[in-house]
Image (spheres, helix red, strand yellow):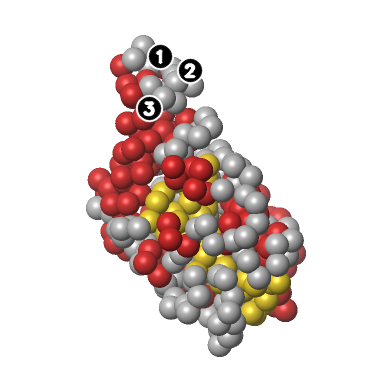
Amino acid sequence: MKKHNFYAGPSILPEVAIEETIKAIKDFEGTGISLMSVSHRSKEFEAVMNETEALFKELLDIPEGYKVIFLGGGASTQFMMVPYNMLNKKAAYLNTGTWAKKALKEAKGFGEVVEVASSADTIYNYIPKGYEVPADADYFHITTNNTIYGTEIKHDMDCKVPLVADMSSDIFSRPVDVSKYALIYGGAQKNFAPAGVTFVIVKEDILGKVDRYLPTMIDYRTHIENGSMFNTPPVLPIFTGYQTLKWLKNLGGLEVMQKINQEKANLLYSEIDRNKLFKPTVLDEADRSIMNICWIMNDEYKDLEQDFLKFAQERGMVGMKGHRSVGGFRASTYNALPKESVEALVAVMKEFESKH
Ligand SMILES: *Cc1c(COP(=O)(O)O)cnc(C)c1O
């Protein structure tokens, strides 16, 4: 049976990226050596690194003055590295969910942290608005897509202080005006590559402004100066990520990707809104994520939750259980998820409805 992969992360990747990785694991670029055994300093891998960086710049239209680096440690390590490198006295954070809250917690070890707003009061089912960012903050940190709760900041906001964004789960889902940000980071395993590599896009002139000692590995400048090769980079996930970006470019780039993502999301949200059994958790359409779509049973059908999960599983739907803090269901509709998978899910929802 065909499987439809709705996992939130690690998650679906373009088939061609997986196929090319399998080939390279056997014979990397005709070297006769496996991608897993080749030196990161070989000219063949250096080319992969350079081209991956070039595709980041091309697809996201990254302006002059920014660097792209690839690190280990996941987005969670960036929760610490960002304040280490950028927080002198005060930082502002928008609390839109579990990941945002974890980022905020780390920053507290480095200075004063202002939580400008929070949507914790209603299990993070909206993006707070109308808050004030202190003008003397060293930076303002946002999580553009809240993977667990299905909310998303889908525009690039103006901000008086340097803007830092965790884009782990919506990078490459839409065009981004990078010039509005001082730093963008994310773990790879949602929309880019297998787990193991973390990308950081950083405006170079914001660095070097903190007074504290920065351990070598923590200092972004180390990795900029060494082209992400100060220590051994995660060779394999970078290679797969490179294939993902080539796939994205062949597809037509981020405007085309955004259009497809919006179509997939519209399809599923309309069914959730229409189907008598279900209701969405995020009510304001402006806040609805196009990457992670969350919904629950309508009150009178609450008892059917497990039945629906099983019913969907039996029809090939994988990874649809909602996060334990929200319950219900979550379908992650990342870039690589084909529209046919969303159509198949909608058909399953209709079929289940017809039985009740
Ligand atoms: C998954 C996720 C993280 C955590 O990433 P790790 O690479 O596992 O540390 C952080 N932020 C967001 C928005 C995520 O979706």
From mark 2 to mark 3, how far is it between C-alphas?
A: 11 Å
Direction from residue 206 to residue 20 in the image, left or right: left
Identify the disc placed on residue 45.
3
Question: Which of the pair 330/133 is nearer the observer?
Answer: 133
From mark 2 to mark 1, how far is it between C-alphas?
A: 7 Å
Question: Which of the pair 159/95 is nearer the observer?
Answer: 159
- The residue depicted at 55 percent of the width and 82 percent of the height is 135
Nearer to us: label 1 or label 3: 3
Question: Which of the pair 149/339 is nearer the observer?
Answer: 149
From mark 1 to mark 3, how far is it between C-alphas?
A: 12 Å
The residue to which callout 1 is attached is 33
Residue extending farthest bottom: 130
Q: Secondary structure at mark 2?
A: loop
Q: Are marks 2 and 1 in contact (CB under 8 Å)?
A: yes
Q: Quadrant of residue 32?
A: top left
The residue to which callout 2 is attached is 37
Type of the residue with mark 3: Phe
